[in-house]
Amino acid sequence: MMRVESIKIMLSARGVGLLLTALAGIATVLLPVAATPSHGAEGDRPPNVVIILADDMGYSDLGCYGGEIHTPNLDRLAAHGLRFTQCYNTARCWPSRAAIMTGYYPQQARRDTVPGLAKTGGRGQRPAWAPLLPALLRAKNYRSYHSGKWHIDGEPIRCGFDHSYKLDDHDRCFRPKQHDWDSQPLPQPGEDEGYYTTDAIAQYAVEMLQEHEKSFAERSFFLYLCFTCPHFPLQAPQEVIEQYKDVYTQGWNRIQEARGKRLLELGLVNNGPSPMETELGPPYFFPDAFEKLGPGEVRTPIPWNGLNAEQQAFQAAKMAIHAAMVHHMDEAIGKVLNQLQEMGAWEDTLILFASDNGASAEIMVRGDGHDPSAPPGSGQTFLCLGPGWSSAANTPFRRHKTWVHEGGISTPLIVHWPRGIAAQGELRHTPVHFIDFLPTILEVAGIEPPQAWEGMTRPPLPGTSILPLLAQDGTVKRDYLWWLHEGNRAIRVGDWKLVAARDEPWELYNLREDRGETRNVAEQMSHRVAELEALWNKVWTQIQADAKSDLKPGK
């Protein structure tokens, strides 16, 4: 476990920066944006907002979503808030973060690939008309804080954040080489400092909130809290891994079955688990990784009883680490929640928790490599979840991160706001998407979405505020939801979903009856396939036009 005093030493260089920004905050200039009355806040002050993102976490990993992992803090938020059963991301980390923070489909904001544009995709640069949420929240005098993963273009403190702990090294959980405070590089932690990314991300957030309470208590705040777990490499404190060492020896088939049963009992879904696709491996193939990882690694989710003893032990250890990462993240979130309570912000803070995509079937070795003789989950190892456990983590859905079948794009969504949500422990079955987060938060803050930015007209936001859903399910309607990532594509209209993997034909599913996507009715309903395909193409044409809308000819 990380020693707090070690972090204090590491953070001590920030003191001057905190003082300067505190003084600067006194003279903050408000941007002239039309506002509507705020919802649920005391007086004219809008509520605080906290977005918490997990990274590569499966739909059923949390206890409150049917999992066996110990997550009491998130379970508590769910018990006193709302759980959404049909929340969608974009199937990948950087597009999902762009959707949340801009309110646009990632291709519109050039944060996923757009043909004919040079700077799109993972290294894409947003149009000038697509500011991030903190810049918009300045209209209501919010202070904004970021801690953890970034994966958006630009620097946080130049995108509206007042403070940022940014972790750019996604290959090391114990000794990251690239991380910074307010764009100033921090040293790589020493082996004896007790650093662990999850703890550090939470601790920085706590200290930002403590500074806010001391120097800016009269202002609302926005906290963007982005954990890097349980993304590979699977690394966690050994004492936490130990708690799960025997849990997963029963194998992925039984875990999937047990989770599927609990999900049905909880009323979160109405379908059993999709059968594991035993011939489908990782989305990318790195043959050298299997050589480095040894004979315990397997490429496809064959039945557990088909693995030999060495493979079963290796695979069970991987899932124990994954569980430990989620378990430990919940503990870290608990520290942030405790700080909200201690500073009197609990009642009027809107919290949204989700995962940036489904669990990952990827298998690779990066960072400092993999030492087979080191304890699994230590900093000397580099393990990935793989398709067997990814299938179990995404129960009851099909496929994984990068695919836009339900397993790749479905996320838990917990919404908690004591002053703004009367219901407790209820479910919301209305489909929602990450593009809905920004318009919802703007409405909660009493800010009208600007129609122009930096002198440029903005495309209409594709999402909608889900604020009415906090009071009653079924109160938000939309024409469609749309996806594209690396050739994987889909569109949902009502209960119908048209979906295809890269270079494969369209599949059609009625999600009301078959959210597990096991009964493809494309051949029987070719007319509906044609209608939805035409709509998908129409939307894609408009999205590409939006992405190019501020470019001069020749760019």
Image (cartoon, helix red, strand yellow):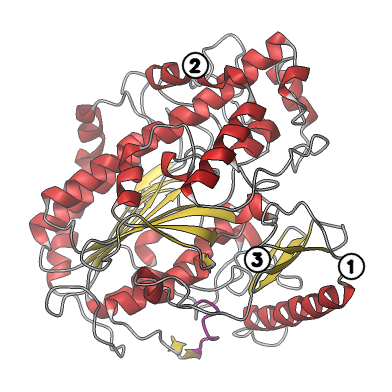
Q: Residues within 10 Å of mark 2 (few under 14, many from 20)?
A: some
Residue located 60% across and 26% down the image: 383
> Is residue 70 left or right of 380 when viewed as pictured?
left
* Real-space CA distance between mark 1 and mark 3, rounded to the nearest whole angstrom: 38 Å
Residue located 39% across and 72% down the image: 472
Judged by depth in the image, the label closer to the viewer, 1 or 3, is 1
Task: Describe the element under mark 3 as helix, strand or loop.
Answer: loop
> Is residue 9 left or right of 374 when viewed as pictured?
left
Judged by depth in the image, the label closer to the viewer, 1 or 2, is 1
* Mark linked to residue 120: 3
Residue type, numbered disc 2: Lys
> Is residue 60 visible from the viewing direction of this image?
no
Q: Residues within 10 Å of mark 1 (few under 14, many from 20)?
A: few
The question of residue 217 being in magenta is answered with no
> Is residue 492 left or right of 171 when viewed as pictured?
right
* Real-space CA distance between mark 3 and mark 2, rounded to the nearest whole angstrom: 42 Å
Residue type, numbered disc 3: Thr
Number of marks in the rendered image: 3
Q: Position of residue 4 (x, y in %)?
A: 22, 30
* Mark linked to residue 3: none
**Is 236 above or below relative to 34?**
above
Q: Position of residue 194 (x, y in %)?
A: 32, 23
Task: Describe the element under mark 2 as helix, strand or loop.
Answer: loop
Magenta segment boundaries in residue numbering: 457-463
Q: Which residue is mark 1?
A: 524
